[in-house]
């Protein structure tokens, strides 16, 4: 695969994921609007209905989010060794390779995000 084809494949993957995240954001806004409308139960003297529905929504949302994070974290952590071995080399040396610093910056960022996901899972 040529460099241009590889770059195009990476760009398309990013765009697909960005579209999905945009859809998720729209769903968040929809859920927010729906839960704001629950105050009608309290103003009608049925606050218990608002409490129960809100608790159910939050529990389901947290459960789905936690499951997603745990799945992603587990899958990526299992591949960390292989990802690390993808470091660019020149003459068998990483320090001489173009992109060496960018690779480690990206790898460190990934590890930091994984630590954040792990902390959320522990909470």
Image: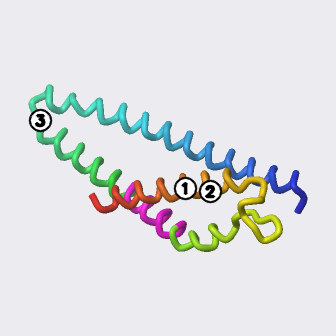
Residue 101: percent from the left, percent from the top? 67, 52
Q: Which residue appears at 70% of the width and 67% of the height?
A: 86
Judged from the image, the secondary structure of the residue bearing numbered disc 1 is helix
Q: CA distance from mark 3 to mark 1?
A: 50 Å
Q: Which mark is residue 61?
A: none
Q: CA distance from mark 1 to mark 2?
A: 6 Å
Q: Return the disc, 3 or 1, that comes first in the chain's sequence.
A: 3
Tell me, yes or no, whether the two marked residues, 1 and 2, touch with CB atoms within 8 Å: yes
Q: Which residue appears at 53% of the width and 69% of the height?
A: 75
Q: Which mark is residue 104?
A: 2
Q: CA distance from mark 2 to mark 3?
A: 55 Å
Nearer to the camera, 122 or 13: 122
Residue 88: percent from the left, percent from the top? 75, 63
Q: Return the disc, 2 or 3, that comes first in the chain's sequence.
A: 3
Classify residue 80 by image quadrant: bottom right
In which quadrant of the rendered image does the C terminus lie? bottom left
Q: Which residue is mark 3?
A: 46
In the drawing, does residue 79 fall left or right of residue 43? right
Judged from the image, the secondary structure of the residue bearing numbered disc 3 is loop
In the drawing, does residue 25 fall left or right of residue 90? left
Q: Which residue is mark 1?
A: 108
Classify residue 117 by image quadrant: bottom left
Q: Main secondary structure of the magenta part?
A: helix
Residue 67: percent from the left, percent from the top? 40, 62
Nearer to the camera, 97 or 114: 97
**Magenta segment range?**
65-76
């Amino acid at each position: 695969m040529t460099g241009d084809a590889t770059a195009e494949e990476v760009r398309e993957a990013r765009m697909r994921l960005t579209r999905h995240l945009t859809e998720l954001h729209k769903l968040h806004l929809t859920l927010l609007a729906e839960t704001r409308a629950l105050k009608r139960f309290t103003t009608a003297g049925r606050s218990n209905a608002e409490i129960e529905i809100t608790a159910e929504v939050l529990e389901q949302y947290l459960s789905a989010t936690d499951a997603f994070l745990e799945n992603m974290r587990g899958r990526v952590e299992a591949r960390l060794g292989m990802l690390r071995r993808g470091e660019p080399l020149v003459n068998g040396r990483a320090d001489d390779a173009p992109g060496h610093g960018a690779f480690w910056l990206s790898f460190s960022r990934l590890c930091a995000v994984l630590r954040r996901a792990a902390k959320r899972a522990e909470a």
